[in-house]
């Protein structure tokens, strides 16, 4: 991998950093409780082009690559981890799905509005919680039934992208449906009271006898399943970058506090135990930095990045929970109260191993791929085995 960033990547990192420092960071605590401020900031990020940054230029996007996307997610998440979620949802989930959908005449106007920031959306994926979203044919329309307990940004979005299963067969046939928030039969509930990532404004949605024109089913069966897989890979890189940004924020806050807090007449940072904690945090962050960027680079080269994305996410989630925990410990008692942002960092980190698929799912993806390789090797005659191992 070439670690040198291109001029475009550097410009995006800088622009994201400026927006993050000037707009998001000062509101980090407020957006936990104030939905109108959150909605204003999401709209502002959209107006600057961040929500459609990976969309191609011919529909108004800036055609940013995956490395640039990860840089922007890292910068946003360093200011507030919830905010990284909006970049992930719009670029890696909604943008990716709409770009590869069948119904171009339906999706293009939405894509164009995404690039100008005029609309923002939310994604309700197939839930594992027992909630079911199903779709079936109803004359010329399709009928959607079911519910989803937790959909990020649902309370502040203008439309939903919904992943549903076929109601009429046992096969897990998958469909992606696009629906404006005003669609009759769509009910968006109150924002959930979550432990962390509160700025994600996660809300339940109910689909009650909801009828949509067939054209709003923008993708179905094998094609939809393929799109969803790519969305997961892309989003996984985003979550790893989100964890990285959050860990950096916690480590910087801890370093600053340890330089300021005096015990026995000197800053606690001078004590070896504290210096070692900082050294370990910083080293873990640097190790985790490589993985999302490697996965992003692979994706930009058109190479398979599924495993690299799952590994980056798995590692980064472990790292950020460790780092935020140590950062809180280093603050002593004040770390546990609202006075310092480290308390919010600690709560936010906990969610990153759950959202969009728990860490066990990442392990399953990696484990499955390893088994596939073993099976492949087992089938190979001995003389070819060595050349495979040697690459
Ligand atoms: C704040 C918040 C925001 C969210 N936003 C969205 C959103 O925007 N869109 C959306 O679609 N969803 C969203 N979700 C839902 C989230 O993606 C799911 O909660 C998550 O995927 C975990 O699924 P689950 O809750 O069904 O847990 P389960 O799948 O029931 O998992 C329960 C336990 O079983 C383990 N487990 C599950 N599957 C396996 C497996 N295959 N192998 C081994 N162990 C396994 C898990 O590790 C976990 O410990 C959100 C949730 C929250 C809390």
Image: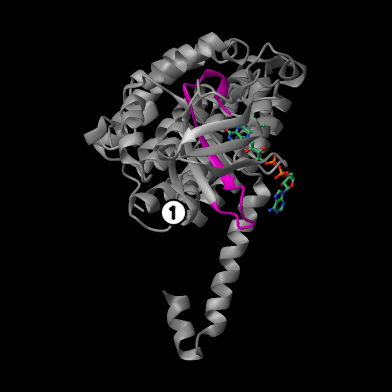
Of residues 321 and 175, the one nearer the viewer is 175
Residue at image coords 62%, 55%:
169
Tally of numbered discs = 1
Observer able to see residue 275: no
Give the quadrant of residue 372: bottom right
Observer able to see residue 106: yes
Label 1: which secondary element: helix
The verdict on residue 35 being magenta is: no
Residue at image coords 39%, 39%:
98
Residue ID for mark 1: 223
**Residue 186, image x, y percentages:** 57, 25
**Residue 257, image x, y percentages:** 63, 18
Q: Is residue 379 left or right of residue 269?
A: left
Quarter of the picture holding the C terminus: bottom left
Of residues 89 and 343, the one nearer the viewer is 89
Furthest-right residue in this view: 333
Residue at image coords 43%, 50%:
294
Q: How is the image coloured?
A: one colour
The verdict on residue 165 being magenta is: yes
**Residue 381, image x, y percentages:** 50, 89
Q: Is residue 388 left or right of residue 370?
A: left
Of residues 386 and 301, the one nearer the viewer is 301
Ligand 1 is found in which quarter of the picture? top right
Furthest-front residue in this view: 139
User: Mark 1 packing: few (<14 Cα in 10 Å), some, or many (20+)?
Assistant: some
**Please, is residue 100 above or below residue 48 in the view?**
below
| Residues shaded magenta | 152-173
Residue at image coords 51%, 39%:
142
**Please, is residue 151 above or below residue 285 in the view?**
above
């Amino acid at each position: 991998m070439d670690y040198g960033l291109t001029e475009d990547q550097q410009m995006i990192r800088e622009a994201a950093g400026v927006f993050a420092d000037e707009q998001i960071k000062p509101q980090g605590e407020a957006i936990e409780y104030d939905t109108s401020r959150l909605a204003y900031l999401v709209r502002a990020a959209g107006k600057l082009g961040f929500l459609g940054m990976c969309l191609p230029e011919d529909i108004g996007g800036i055609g940013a690559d995956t490395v640039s996307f990860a840089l922007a997610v890292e910068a946003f998440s360093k200011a507030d981890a919830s905010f990284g979620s909006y970049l992930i949802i719009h670029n890696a989930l909604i943008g990716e799905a709409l770009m590869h959908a069948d119904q171009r005449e339906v999706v293009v106007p939405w894509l164009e509005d995404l690039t100008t920031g005029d609309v923002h959306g939310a994604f309700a994926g197939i839930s594992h919680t027992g909630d079911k979203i199903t779709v079936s044919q109803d004359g010329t329309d399709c009928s959607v039934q079911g519910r989803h307990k937790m959909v990020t940004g649902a309370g502040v979005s203008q439309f939903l992208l919904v992943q549903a299963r076929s109601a009429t067969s046992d096969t897990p046939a998958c469909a992606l449906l696009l629906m404006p928030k005003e669609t009759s039969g769509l009910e968006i509930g109150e924002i959930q009271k979550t432990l962390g990532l509160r700025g994600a404004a996660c809300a339940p949605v109910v689909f009650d006898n909801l009828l949509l024109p067939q054209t709003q089913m923008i993708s179905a069966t094998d094609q939809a399943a393929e799109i969803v897989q790519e969305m997961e890979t892309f989003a996984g890189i985003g979550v790893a970058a989100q964890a990285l940004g959050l860990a950096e924020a916690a480590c910087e806050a801890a370093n600053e506090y340890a330089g300021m807090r005096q015990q026995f007449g000197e800053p606690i940072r001078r004590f070896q135990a504290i210096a070692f904690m900082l050294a370990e945090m910083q080293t873990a962050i640097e190790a985790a930095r490589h993985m999302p960027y490697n996965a992003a680079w692979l994706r930009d080269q058109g190479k398979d990045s599924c495993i690299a994305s799952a590994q980056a996410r798995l590692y980064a989630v472990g790292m950020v929970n460790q780092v935020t925990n140590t950062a809180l410990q280093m603050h002593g008692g004040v770390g546990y109260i609202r006075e310092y942002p480290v308390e919010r960092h600690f709560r936010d980190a906990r969610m990153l191993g759950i959202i969009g698929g728990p860490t066990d799912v990442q392990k399953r993806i990696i484990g499955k791929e390893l088994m596939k390789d073993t099976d492949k090797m087992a089938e190979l005659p001995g003389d070819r085995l060595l050349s495979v191992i040697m690459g």
